[in-house]
Amino acid sequence: MFKFKESRVRRKYSDFDSFRKVLESQTNNVVIPKLPEKSFFNYHRFNDDFIEERRQGLQQFLKVIAGHPLLQTGSKALTSFVQDEHWNKSKFL
C-alpha cells in the first residue's frame, strides 16, 4: 500500500485535524484516536517543551493509525498523508 518504506513530510496541526476528520468520515469499524491537545493560549504555541510534547503526540497518533490493519490496506488518505509532499484534504472529502 505504501509507496516508500520510510518517508518524511511536514504537516501543520490543522493538517492532522483535517486528516483525522477524513479518516472518521471514511471508516465505520475503526476508532480514530484523538489528537494531542491544541494550545488555546499564544504563550504555549512557541514554548519548546509544549511543541516537543505535541510533536511526540502527533507522531504517536500516526504510528497507531499507520499500524492499524484496516487502515493500512484500505485508506488512500493515509498513504497520501504520510508520503505525499503536499497533502490535499479535498481529494478525500
Image (cartoon, helix red, strand yellow):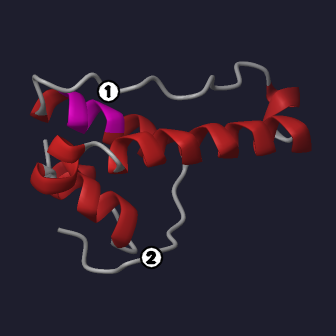
- Residue 80 in percent (x, y) is at 27, 63
Within 10 Å of the Cα at label 1, are there few (<14), some (14-19), or many (20+) other Cα atoms? some
Residue 83: give x, y in percent of width and height: 35, 70
Q: Nearer the viewer, residue 47 or 65?
A: 65
**Of helix, strand and loop, which mostly describes the magenta segment?**
helix
Q: Which mark is residue 80?
A: none
Residue marked by disc 2: 6
Q: Say if the magenta span includes residue 22.
A: yes
Quadrant housing the N terminus: bottom left
Name the secondary structure under disc 2: loop
Q: On the image, which quarter does residue 78 sit in?
A: bottom left
* Numbered badge on residue 32: 1
Query: At 89% across and 44% down in the image, what residue appears?
Result: 48
Looking at the image, residue 52 lies above or below residue 42: below
User: How many angstroms separate mark 1 from mark 2 (CA)?
Assistant: 22 Å
Q: Count neighbours of disc 2 (C-alpha within 10 A) and say few if under 14, some if 14 to 19, many if 20 or more.
A: few
Residue 22 is left or right of residue 13, and the answer is left
Question: Is 54 one of the magenta-colored residues?
Answer: no
Q: The disc labelled 1 sits on which kind of residue?
A: Ile
Residue at position x 35%, y 50% from top? 66
Image quadrant in which you'd find residue 21: top left
Looking at the rendered image, the quarter that the C terminus falls into is top left
Residue numbers of the magenta segment: 20-24
- Helix, strand or loop at mark 1: loop
Say left or right for 19 vs 13.
left
Residue at 12% across, 24% down:
29
Task: Report whether 56 appears left or right of 3.
Answer: right
- Residue 4 location, x and y as percent? 33, 80
Q: Which residue is more in the foreground, 81 or 67?
A: 67
Earlier in the chain: of badge 1 and badge 2, it is 2
